[in-house]
Image (spheres, rainbow, N blue to C red):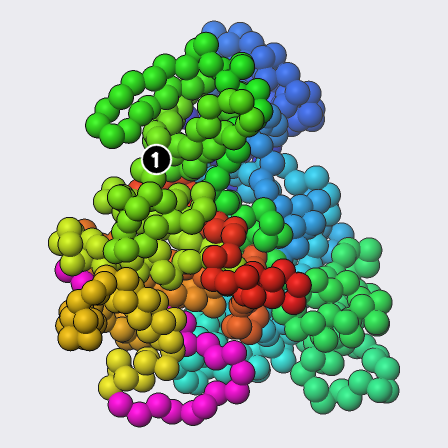
Amino acid sequence: MPLPPAPSRRAALLAPEAFEVTARPRIAAASANEAIATPQRTAATPARAGRKADSAASSPAAPDTASLVQVETRARAPEPAAPPPVARSTGTRKARSTGTTAAAAGAAPATTTTPRTRKSAPQGPTKLFVLDTNVLLHDPTSLFRFEEHDIFLPMIVLEELDGHKKGMTEVARNGRQTSRTLDALAGVQGADIAHGLKLDSTGQRAAGGHLFFQTVPLDYSLPTSLPPGKADNQILGVVEALRKLHAPREVVLVSKDINMRVKARALGLNAEDYQNDKTLEDGDLLYAGVLALPPDFWAKSGKNVESWQSGAHTYYRIGGPIVPQLMINQFVYFEAPGEPSLFARVSEIREKTAVLQTLKDYGSAKNAVWGVTTRNREQNYAMNLLMDPEIDFVTLTGTAGTGKTLLALAAGLTQVLDDRRYTEIIMTRATVSVGEDIGFLPGTEEEKMGPWMGALDDNLEFLAKGDGGNAGEWGRAATNELIRSRIKIKSMNFMRGRTFLNKYVIIDEAQNLTPKQMKTLITRAGPGTKIICMGNLAQIDTPYLTEGSSGLTYAVDRFKGWPHSGHITLARGERSRLADFASEVL
């Protein structure tokens, strides 16, 4: 006998014509009624539901009853194995307290179980988020970042989107992408704007709520000091009207405009920043790439440590509670009076053990790189990453004067001119000025980038002087010419579509890049290419970028633990005593 069709809604009774009962109809009906009337008991005791299905299997009507019980069990059974998702809805990481009791506000239930994605049961009422235009222009995918919550777009937001769609700027591209997304949601078969568009109808399974548009005028009153013709004030009026209309449901305004949020709070409205673009809440939580071993490390782990020699490196296999804290290519060190010091890099991690590899000492004059020796522990870590051919991606962060550019250039010149590992050095940076812009620059692409590359010129002058030695003026001039012939200065504006083969790419001032720009640059790497990203997260000049949302922070966080990448935060300034003191007190 074929299985009956699946019910059209949760715990729905099957139509009588869907199956034919040939024996014991009373038992089958009783089982079906029990499955409908007491869904909580069925979900709470799946073992009993299974026994009922097994006992009913001996009757001809067993397939119908068993399938009905299984449908109800799948729909209502809790999922203890699935951990609750991290609170990253809006921008507001506090918006995790959500739930399915949105029916009072006219919203659809939030939990939907799909074959590919299973969400844990929400734990409170869903919220209604009203998005400001700047959120959509900042992140066109923000519509799908609110998990099971609902989204409302005032009509003035659509009007402003239409006004920003022209041009080749990042804002214009985001505006066009948002318009295409809205059109795709509205074009889904069966979509009804009046009752809300399902946000997961285009394949975005992380979004479980609905998108509502302002289709009718809303009645609201604002203070006379707020002119009604301004777009921001109209959005505030919509939020005020929705709060009264859907009380007691929570209505929240999400805006990147600080003054907009201040005005909303002054009017007693809930307002929050859009936080989903932030990789970290606090810059102090950024992965540093270095871990200090505990003071009792040798006392506790010394007896169980295995060690062996291979080439110029010594390897140690360690275990214990320190292993879960380690990552591939993370540096560890142990320093204590009267104890043997250890400076190593994590080269392998198994389930309960990790292998540490000792480092090459670039602070010694015999290991100098293009005449440069490292002056502190973090610089030595950085040079080990820069000189390792197995490391394809290196990120260096640190304050001014810590030696990021000098180390990267010295390692690049050695591997390009001496080792012939790469064919040339390509250097680029974000062209974001500190003060007023000086206008258009004449000349070719490289000439236009010249004023932005003052750091390159300063470091090349130092490196050429150290390499020239006693060669005289002609020797130094020849060295400068050779170095210049192997360094290409490129603008980021023309990177789209390029592929770098066997290049040594340096991205300076990477803290001023957005995550999208960082992705564009890193994906240019072809076979044999190494990319170095450097920056100081305390010197961000790009508007709307913070330490948590910078592309450099994004790259460091996403690449940590990858076997072919490494990161170091340089701590000590080595430029001069004046620069070190200024960075501390100013």
Q: How many marks?
A: 1
**In which quadrant is the N terminus drawn?**
top left
Q: Can residue 37 be seen by looking at this rendering?
A: yes
Q: Nearer the viewer, residue 150 or 580?
A: 580
Q: Residue at x 42, y 58 (%)?
A: 403
Q: Position of residue 581 (x, y in %)?
A: 60, 62
Residue 440 lies in magenta, yes or no?
yes
Q: Residue at x 66, y 73 (%)?
A: 257
Label the magenta part by its dominant secondary structure: loop
Q: Residue at x 36, y 24 (%)?
A: 355
Left or right placement of residue 521 versus residue 172 in this view: left
Q: Position of residue 487 (x, y in %)?
A: 22, 68
Start-end of magenta stretch:
422-443
Residue 48 lies in magenta, yes or no?
no
- Dividing the picture into quarters, in which one does residue 216 lie? bottom right
Q: Nearer the viewer, residue 254 or 542?
A: 542
Left or right placement of residue 410 versus residue 27 in this view: left
